[in-house]
Image (cartoon, grey):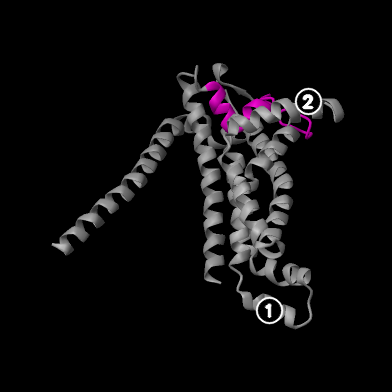
């Protein structure tokens, strides 16, 4: 009877796990079925590197959105990575338990704030500041990078903190016994040992940044151009889908799904890289 109950519980858990995977598989298949016809019709090269996006006239070039997505993503990493690493190092190596018990949950709480709130703050604070003191309209790659950098800060901080804490204590003790200072131990021993975990954290942060939609729509400016300056507006792959899906039809609708296919491939590549570095860090 007991074995029968265990088998039944195992079956229920297995079905729950497979239902989640099946839902993801069905979504993936649906996106590819809807998006691939336009890619075949236009040609993968013309679709990916095409400069003109005018679906009503048959032009389906998404290069401006790809460039805008990557510029905003890398800009957000420039903002987030130094702050996140500094915070993770402080929490793991220098803070007292009392400070860490307050500061770490506070940072993780930032991850629970809706993206529209970040977008509203960017719209009312960051955009006017850039417009007044730096130049341009304020709706720009720079403004979006600042807001997304703050958004991905909790993700990179938490995973980097875990990677640093996973470094064996004997590494620190050995370095200190050889006469190194606390900071020298962190810089020359702990961080190199935690490198793969930190890289995985950064890659996951990049995936979060490139997949963000609402805050980007509110701050980036949404112009279909290749941004040549941090002060230029941009449109990302996600915002392009969100802005146009409501009224798209025919090839236009399929082209938006095809944009989702390209975005899906990019994010899957990033997640695969993050999983590789995470498994490499766990095996060390």
Note whether residue 116 is visible. yes
Discs 1, 2 touching: Cβ within 8 Å: no
Q: Which residue is mark 2?
A: 128
Q: Is residue 7 above or below residue 68?
A: below
Marks 1 and 2, the one that precedes in the sequence: 2
Q: Position of residue 3 (x, y in %)?
A: 17, 64
Q: Identify which residue is drawn at 78% across, 23% down.
A: 137
Q: Position of residue 140 (x, y in %)?
A: 74, 30
Q: Give whichever of 52, 115 is nearer the camera.
A: 115
Q: Position of residue 94 (x, y in %)?
A: 72, 63
Would residue 32 be found to the left or right of residue 241 on screen?
left
> SS at mark 2?
helix
Q: How many marks?
A: 2
Among the 4 quarters of the image, the one containing residue 244? top right
Q: Nearer the viewer, mark 1 or mark 2?
A: 1
Q: Is residue 45 above or below residue 156?
A: above
Q: Is residue 103 above or below residue 188?
A: above
Position of the N terminus, as image quadrant, is: bottom left
Would residue 199 be found to the left or right of residue 19 on screen?
right
Note whether residue 234 is visible. no
Q: CA distance from mark 1 to mark 2?
A: 50 Å
Q: Identify which residue is drawn at 77% across, 33% down.
A: 228
Q: Which residues are magenta?
A: 215-244
Instruction: Name the disc covering residue 173, or none.
Output: 1
Decide whether residue 217 is among the magenta residues. Answer: yes
């Amino acid at each position: 009877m007991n074995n029968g109950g265990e088998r039944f519980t195992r079956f229920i858990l297995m079905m729950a796990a497979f239902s989640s995977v099946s839902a993801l598989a069905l979504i993936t298949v649906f996106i590819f079925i809807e998006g691939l016809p336009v890619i075949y019709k236009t040609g993968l090269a013309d679709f990916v590197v095409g400069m003109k996006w005018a679906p009503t006239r048959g032009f389906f070039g998404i290069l401006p959105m790809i460039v805008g997505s990557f510029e905003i993503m890398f800009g957000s990493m420039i903002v987030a990575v130094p702050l996140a690493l500094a915070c993770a190092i402080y929490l793991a190596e220098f803070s007292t338990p009392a400070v860490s018990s307050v500061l770490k949950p506070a940072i993780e709480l930032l991850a629970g704030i809706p993206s529209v709130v970040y977008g509203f703050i960017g719209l009312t604070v960051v955009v006017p500041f850039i417009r007044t003191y730096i130049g341009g309209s304020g709706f720009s790659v720079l403004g979006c990078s600042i807001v997304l950098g703050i958004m991905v800060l909790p993700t990179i901080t938490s995973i980097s903190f875990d990677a640093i804490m996973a470094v064996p204590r004997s590494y620190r003790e050995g370095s200190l016994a050889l006469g190194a200072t606390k900071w020298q131990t962190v810089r020359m021993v702990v961080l190199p040992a935690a490198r793969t975990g930190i890289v995985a954290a950064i890659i996951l942060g990049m995936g979060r940044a490139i997949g963000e939609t609402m805050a980007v729509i509110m701050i980036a400016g949404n112009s279909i151009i290749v941004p040549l300056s941090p002060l230029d507006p941009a449109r990302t792959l996600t915002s392009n889908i969100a802005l146009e899906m409501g009224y798209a039809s025919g090839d236009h609708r399929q082209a938006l799904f095809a944009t989702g296919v390209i975005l899906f491939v990019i994010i899957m590549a990033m997640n695969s890289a993050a999983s590789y570095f995470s498994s490499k860090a766990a095996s060390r």
